[in-house]
Image: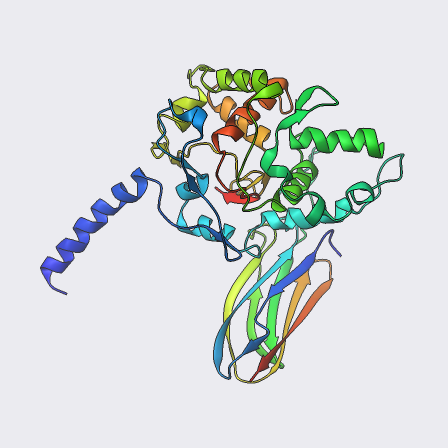
Amino acid sequence: MADGAKPRVKAPKSASAGEVVTIKTLISHKMESGQRKNKDGSVIPRSIINRFTCEFNGTSVIDVKMEPAISTNPYFEFEAKIPESGDLKFTWYDDDGSVYEDVKTVQVG
Amino acid sequence: MNFKALTAIAALMVAAPALTFADPDNDTLTINGEEMVTKAPLPAHLEDSMLTEIMSGWHFRNDDTQAMQMDDFDNPGMLAVEDAAAAWDTVEGTAGKSCASCHENVEDSMKGVRAVYPKWNEKAGEVRTLAMQINNCRTENMGAEPYKYDSGPMAAMEALITVQSRGMPVDVAIDGPVADTWEKGKEIYYTRFGQLELSCASCHEQNYGNMIRADHLSQGQINGFPTYRLKNAKLNTVHGRFKGCVRDTRAETFSPGSPEFVALELYVASRGNGLSVEGPSVRN
């Protein structure tokens, strides 16, 4: 697990059926590109979040592949249509194999 | 769309940059729904200056940058605040204490603190900035190593303390025991430095609102510090910013934490008396 990786999600707790809601996500992560060198001249190994997904009740909402040029603390803001009550599941995949997860429940009604 | 409409649009496109670039905007800054004072009448000591009102640097940034500051989730500076909140509760040093050991809950104990700093410390007989006070606490009360004056942990701790005063008006004292330091700060503000022979006032009083190459000059207010800058993707301290500014005049700079910068911080802070504490703000 990379140092200080911590996921954060801002999603509404309730919505009306079929409403399009805005979801904001951020994970604190250093996103080391693998291009930089340290003081000794040796390459600092690449360490990035390479994939981010969001699912709603098992249905894919968004699936993002990330590359080394993405800045530190990747932030995604997107919209999702909420047809029914359920769970938004967010997953971040780290280069080192760690997986970070967060779940937000949205109530319809 | 007819030809006339196209011409009108073309005319607008030519005119618009001139309008938007010449002056700061008139938007309203709300943070998490709370309205901030970003324009205020001149403090009494600025009546003879060239300013007509004081203005937060927020007005000089573009809409995207402005929006980042309006919601804490979007403000990258708040990540540092979270780090500092953890540091607040962490025991360090020989005395076995954390910040919380004495000051308990940061929300209550640090409310209003940022708004009045730098201020006179009676016991030490000196003007102290927030950073000096933090380090004094660390070395004297905790027996811990001081933070480097303009380092990341220091900026983060300042941000944590600052955010407790957000929305309160800046209100630093300029008379009494601090008067000498304030005068010294004022002298530095109006003194030209470097090969380019620029004073703070050359840009931030006489030319705010104008472009200096690609930068939109603000009034150089520090009510939004510590500031998250998009250019270096971290929180920046007041003294770090001063250093950058003086360097850009092609001068040898004073050091962060030096008596000169402490005096300048007091003076510049007093130029923003009446604006809301905004920190940690987002700028480019």
Compare residues B161 and B155 and report the one nearer the observer: B161
Across and down, in percent, residue B269 comes to 53, 30
Figure colour scheme? rainbow
Please tell me which residue lies in front, B84 or A30. B84
Between A103 and B84, the residue placed more toward the observer is: B84
- The answer to which quarter of the image holds residue B9 is bottom left
Q: Position of residue A49 (x, y in %)?
A: 64, 58
Q: Looking at the rendering, in which quadrant would you find the N terminus of chain B?
A: bottom left
Q: Residue at x 48, y 83 (%)?
A: A18
In the rendered image, the vertical position of residue B2 relative to residue B34, given as above or below:
below
Identify which residue is drawn at 50% across, 58% down: B33
Q: How many marks do you count on the picture?
A: 0
Q: Position of residue A68 (x, y in %)?
A: 59, 52
Picture quadrant where residue A57 is located: bottom right
Q: Nearer the viewer, residue A48 or B219?
A: B219
Q: Is residue A59 left or right of residue B213?
A: right
Is residue B150 in view? no
Most distant residue in the front direction: B176
Q: Position of residue B100 (x, y in %)?
A: 79, 45
Relative vertical location of residue B18 with respect to residue A5 in this rendering, above or below? above
Can residue B4 be seen here? The reply is yes
